[in-house]
Image: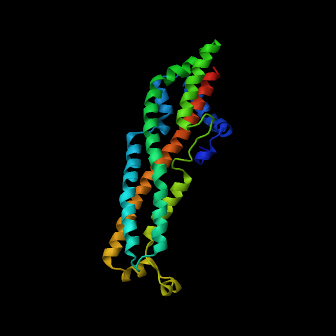
Amino acid sequence: MLYIHKLSDLNPKSAEIESIPYVRGMNISGAFPFKQQKVVELFAEAAISDSDAALIERSLRLLDPTLAKLNGLLARNDPVHEPVDLKRTIQCLQSLALPLANNLQYSREVIALQQEFMVGAAGMLNSIPTLRTAEEKSRVNAEISAYFEKVLRSKGFSFTHQDLVHEAQTRIVHDLAESFRNGYLFHVTLEEELKKATFADIKLRIPSEKLKEAEDIGTSISIIKEGVDQAYSLNMRMVVWAIVFYSCIKLATSR
């Protein structure tokens, strides 16, 4: 998409702009009247699958054991570790728990919703030009609105995402993963700071079993990051879904 780059960018104005190339493409391909297979193709880039939910669930399950390891290191009060780094890592991972749990539930809801939508979408869209009475229009409008409300979690044309994984969580987990690749958690002496020592130099004085502990935690954080990224990707795909649906309605209404 050209103008929507984050979840909060979706609004009626941005949807109208983003819909232009979609409607043009559908006109060129002769998409209307819609057939079920064409609807599947149009919404393919926004499709959600069980694998999305599985990756999110894997990350969510890994949070507690990873936090337990970090809390164990903090309680040990080993001078080789930097307590501030341990505490920050614990706080960051704790902040991911609720958004990931909410996103897991949301993923399951939209998987079921998309399956239902694909069955009747073509017929619903094709009926739009034929609607005559106020009752007919009201019925189809209510059906359309219900889909938007469930996907966007809002009665307005915006995505209620604040309790899901959004840009803040992706930054947190990306920064953590990068920090662990550079020796995060270990105390750096003043002499090492003055010499601008790299972690390759610092790790030479750290016992191998303690390096292994940090590497294992870093690996877990990388796996958690995959689930966070997948959750964010899923949410952005639902924004795309809303744009594609909006475009299909525009095309049908113009007939």
The extreme right residue here reads: 13
Looking at the rendering, in which quadrant would you find the C terminus? Answer: top right
Instruction: Find residue 5 and report its horizontal and vertical position in percent.
Output: 60, 48
Horizontal side of residue 123 vs 20, given as left or right:
left
Instruction: Identify which residue is drawn at 40% across, 57% down.
Output: 63
Residue at horizontal 47 percent and vertical 50 percent from the top: 98
Q: Residue furthest bottom?
A: 191
Query: Residue 114, position in %: x, y?
Result: 46, 32
The vertical placement of 7 against 12, above or below, is below
**Nearer to the camera, 119 or 1:** 119
Task: Residue 41: give x, y in percent of width and height.
Answer: 47, 32
Give the mark count. 0
The single residue placed furthest to the top in the displayed view is 133
Q: State the residue lying farthest toward the front.
A: 75
Image coordinates of residue 118 in percent, x first then y, are 46, 27
Instruction: Name the foreground residue: 164 vs 211.
Output: 164
Color theme of the render: rainbow
Name above or below for residue 251 compared with residue 61.
Answer: above
Residue depicted at 46% across the width and 65% down the height: 89
Residue at left 41%, top 78%? 200
Q: Is residue 5 left or right of residue 230?
A: right
Asked whether 212 or 37 is in front, the reply is: 212
In the picture, the quarter occupied by the N terminus is top right
Q: Is residue 77 visible?
A: yes
In this rendering, does residue 33 appear at all? no
Name the foreground residue: 185 vs 41.
185
